[in-house]
Image: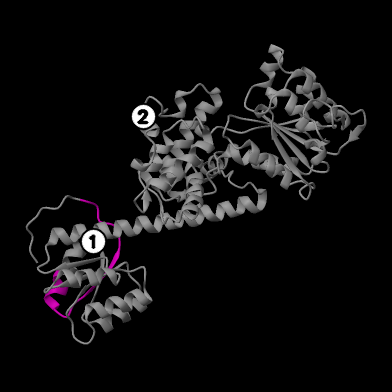
Amino acid sequence: MESTVKATPRAALPGNILVVDDDPLIVRSLHELLRHEGYRVETASCGREALERLAAAPCDMVITDVNMPEMDGAALLRRIKESFPSVLVILVTGYGTIESAVDAVKAGAYQYISKPLIDDEIKILIARALEQKQLVSEQRRLKQENESLRQQLGRKFQLGSIIGRDYKMQRVFETVQLVGESKATVLITGESGTGKTVIARAIHHNSNRRQKPFVEINCGALPETLLESELFGHARGAFTGAFRDKIGKFQTADGGTIFLDEISTSSQALQVKLLRVLQDHVFEKIGQHETIHVDVRVILATNTNLAKEVEKGSFREDLFYRINVVTMELPPLRERLSDIELLADHFLEHYCRENGKGIQGIHESALEVMRHYSWPGNVRELENVIERAVVLSRNDTVLPEDLPPALHNEETAILTPSDQILPLKEALSLPEKRIIERALRANKWNRQKTAAMLKVNRTTLFNKMKKYGLLAE
């Protein structure tokens, strides 16, 4: 073999390689070259012997000559792809043509190269092939793990697209399970896009009311007069345009759950009626004196600080204390960065299926861009970003260039959550969590190696992984 080009040094990936050729000089030369690069190398002098070796101990790659007696390289390629589809095959020939190369790739060969073999070129080719195989294998493993975790969360909590292994989200999941069977009023707080509606649905589905209606209404989307009619109904002739009786949302939700989103936007007059329903479970339709009794579980949500609204006088104090029985605060996405990959994979799978795309995963470089973005629109914004990437990407993985410009813009992206003003205890925990997660990834989630790297005992590492929601990995 010749050596004419100096290759860029790159660390060889560990791998088992089988060299197949009826020329002992070629076999010996490749064996010495690849062993020197750190690979484990086996050899065979014909196709039959190669298949026997593969059956005894499958390898990562086969490098085979095309022109061999009994079984040529093309026939061996077909047999390997039938019985060992994950094995990479590189065909080598002294009589290569464009047509034969095309046929080989169509048959499943990773590459088709011509003699004489150049040392540095074949080293680069093998390293690149094994690196890609390792990446695909890792993406497949992560996808399977993420799917398993999604199924577990779905079965246990019925949370739909609200997914998370971050310790803050784990607390939310636990609270959902605890309050589900109770009759307590629940107030869900959090920024827009954090998933308050889905959590409300999860509470309903984990309650004994799950067979009854779940009715939701956005209080901020309707004017005051129309909102009152929507909630409580009206009698025919109660106001101009009321041509027939109308059943309100509270009556529709009887026996089930009603979810009132953006409750802070409701008027003082409406708040009085809401307080009465919460306390006495009764109300009257607009324009009607008959009292209606309902059995409804009430869940409310807001993206504002209701305590401050009480101080300003825009929200009734008595209603605030009545609805502030069980409060669930949903963390913004920038405070649960470890969930970005899990959520992104979930949305990727959904929108690939919806758009008929075959994207296999998200490249680590794109994930790194997403981890350094502030996500003002939270989970809803992430979902939109992934949908856009699926629609516009021409690659088999989502790359950084498939992401919107805002994610790359330092003026609109916050590089680290530590740039924000957070409670001191929470702010101090963020660097520790990132260091532990980085060390775990570097050691492929091996706890013993990670504990040794961080110079802590395994019990301490386990407790911190549990605290930060990293055990799900």
Does residue 442 appear left or right of residue 261 in this picture? Answer: left
Q: Is residue 323 above or below residue 147?
A: above
Tell me what residue is drawn at x 83 percent, y 38 percent: 251
Q: Measure the C-alpha gap from mark 2 to mark 1.
A: 37 Å
The dot on residue 409 is 2
- Specify the quadrant of the image occupied by residue 268: top right
Region of the chain picked out in magenta, as a range = 10-29
Q: Nearer the viewer, residue 442 or 371?
A: 371
Asked which secondary structure carries label 1, the reply is helix
* Foreground disc of the pair 2, 1: 2
Asked which secondary structure carries label 2, the reply is loop
Callout 2 amino acid = Asn
Does residue 358 appear left or right of residue 148 in this picture? Answer: left
- Specify the quadrant of the image occupied by residue 370: top left
Does residue 74 appear left or right of residue 146 in this picture? Answer: left
Residue 282 visible, this orientation = yes
Whether the residues at callouts 2 and 1 have beta carbons within 8 Å, the answer is: no
The dot on residue 126 is 1
- Image quadrant holding the N terminus, namely bottom left
Which residue in the rendered view is the most extreme toward the bottom?
70
Give x and y (percent) for residue 273: 82, 25
Residue 366 in the magenta stretch? The answer is no
**Label 2: few (<14), some or many (≥20) within 10 Å?**
few
Tell me which colouring the rendered structure shows.
one colour
Residue 336 visible, this orientation = no
Give x and y (percent) for residue 401: 33, 41
Callout 1 amino acid = Ile
Instruction: Please report whichever mark, 2 or 1, sits nearer to the chain's N-terminal start.
Output: 1
